[in-house]
Amino acid sequence: MSTEITPFEALLQIVDAAGSQSKLAAALGVSSTAAWKWVQSSKRLPAEYVLTAERLYGVSRHDLRPDIYPRDYPPAGKLGRKRRDSHRLCEAAK
């Protein structure tokens, strides 16, 4: 059984954790109207607020925006290592 939630459910979780749409809006530095539109119209959090919301409310970026942060994306440490390794290979080839 999958425990993944939809982006809309994740959005509702951060609204609940914040206490209200207005409090979420204040925490993210936007108008209450903007937060209302996220919940009522777009049904997801805009990308520029995902990392802050994750830090403030503990709801995973993967749940908030799986289109941007897929669960199968390699961890940041592994990406950095690959880049360094390929750089070393290029240097060695010179």
Image (spheres, rainbow, N blue to C red):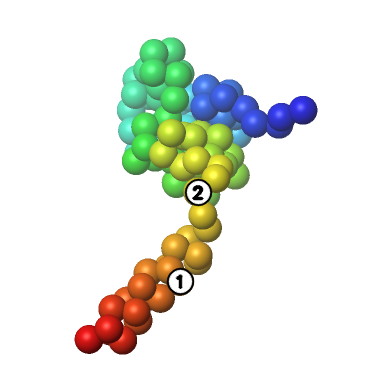
Total marks in image: 2
Q: Is disc 1 placed on a helix, strand or loop? A: helix
Outermost front residue = 93
Residue lying at 65% horizontally and 31% vertically, measured from the top left? 4
For the point 43% across and 68% down, the residue is: 82
Q: Is residue 88 above or below residue 29?
A: below
Residue 73: image tag: 2
Up the image or down, 59 lies above or below 85; here it is above
Where does label 1 land, which residue? Answer: 81
Residue 58's image quarter? top right
Q: Position of residue 71 (x, y in %)?
A: 55, 43
The front one of 53 and 25 is: 53
In the image, residue 34 lies at what x, y percent?
34, 24
Side of 46 relative to 81 (left or right)? left
Q: Quadrant of the N terminus?
A: top right
38 and 4: which one is in front? Answer: 4
Q: Residue 25, located in which quarter of the rendered image?
A: top left
* Label 1 or label 2, whichever comes before in sequence order: 2
How busy is the neighbourhood of tag 2: few (under 14 within 10 Å), some, or many (20 plus)?
A: few
Residue drawn at the location 44% of the way across and 63% of the way down: 79
Type of amino acid under label 1:
Arg
Q: Is residue 20 left or right of residue 34?
A: right
| Distance between mark 1 and mark 2 Cα atoms | 15 Å
Q: Amino acid at mark 2?
A: Tyr
Q: Position of residue 11 (x, y in %)?
A: 52, 27
At x 37%, y 69%, the residue is 83
Q: Is residue 49 visible?
A: yes
Instruction: Give x and y (percent) for residue 33.
Output: 34, 20
Res 16 seen here? no
Residues tagged 1 and 2 counted as in contact (Cβ below 8 A): no
